[in-house]
Amino acid sequence: MATKILALPMSPPIPRPLAAATPTRARRGRPSRRADIYAAALRLFRRNGFHATSINDIGDEAGVAGTAVYSHFSTKQGVLAEAIRDGASRIADGIRPVLGREGSSEEAALEDLVRAYVRVVLENADLNACYVLESRNLDTDVAAPLRRKERLLRSAWQERLLRVRPELTADEAMAMVQMAIFSVLALCVHRNKIDPDALQAQAVAFVLGALRGPVVTPQD
């Protein structure tokens, strides 16, 4: 089957699922304080939601005055946009090496992709929770290009899966990919007490089991 996305290195590498993070320009203030504010905002967006989180809430969580947030981010929307870009950039960086790796069997290549994706998503849970819960709150001009690059990521998964399971239709493969991807992202929404390494191993086993499972058709 010809590939349009994974032909590396002869073809251009797969575009990043989302553009690399473009930090909001800081007007003044220490970089460490900016990082504290950014991390505080992510925790609150994940815990309370974007609309329920105010600038003053972010300041309180970071241990600064609410107005100090504006020294580093122009708007609350700017914090959210940066978080989603940042999370997507980390996913792209995390899976790019396995997409370009040659010499593995098709089955091993699919497993490498799943392991890399699970690891980078769960290690950046606050960022990815923002994506799952709050991407609908992005301005259209920010969201549109991110959606296009997200589709490229799903297509890369679909291509890998079809190489392992050529009996699937393209639509069947894409449905399985969507279920696999979002089952991992869903783990970012709520914190859990499972050991991180154990959670990663469990998620990898679950996703691979789903991708290798039968296609179920309705009974007459």
Image: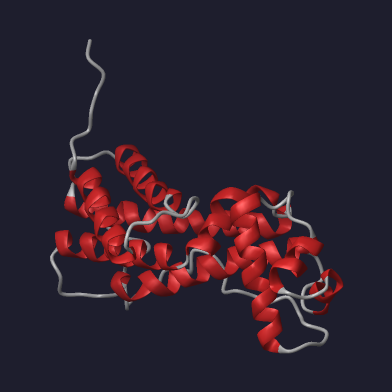
- Provide residue 71's location: percent of width, then percent of height: 82, 79
Q: Is residue 120 left or right of residue 220?
A: right
Residue at x 23%, y 28% (from the top left corner): 216
Front one among 92 and 58: 58
For the C terminus, give its image quadrant.
top left
Q: Quadrant of the N terminus?
A: bottom left
User: In percent of the image, x 22 and y 14: which residue is there?
Assistant: 219
- State the residue at coordinates (62%, 64%): 42
- Residue furthest out toward the top: 220
Q: Is residue 180 above or below residue 59?
A: above
Query: Which residue is pictured at 62% across the width and 71% down the height?
Result: 39
Count of numbered labels shown in the rendering = 0
Residue 119 pos. (x, y %): 35, 66
Q: Position of residue 102 (x, y in %)?
A: 21, 75
Q: Which of the 4 quarters of the picture holds residue 28?
A: bottom right
112 and 164: which one is in front? 112
Look at the image and name its color scheme: secondary structure
> Which of the 4 quarters of the picture holds residue 203?
bottom left
102, above or below 79, in the image: below
Please indicate, yes or no, whether residue 60 appears anywhere in the rendered image. Answer: yes
Q: Is residue 200 left or right of residue 155?
A: left
Residue 171, given in percent of the width and then of the height, sits at: 34, 38
Q: Nearer the viewer, residue 125 or 174?
A: 125
Q: Is residue 12 visible?
A: no
Classify 124 as above or below 26: above
Quarter residue 24 falls in: bottom right
Which residue is outermost to the left?
105
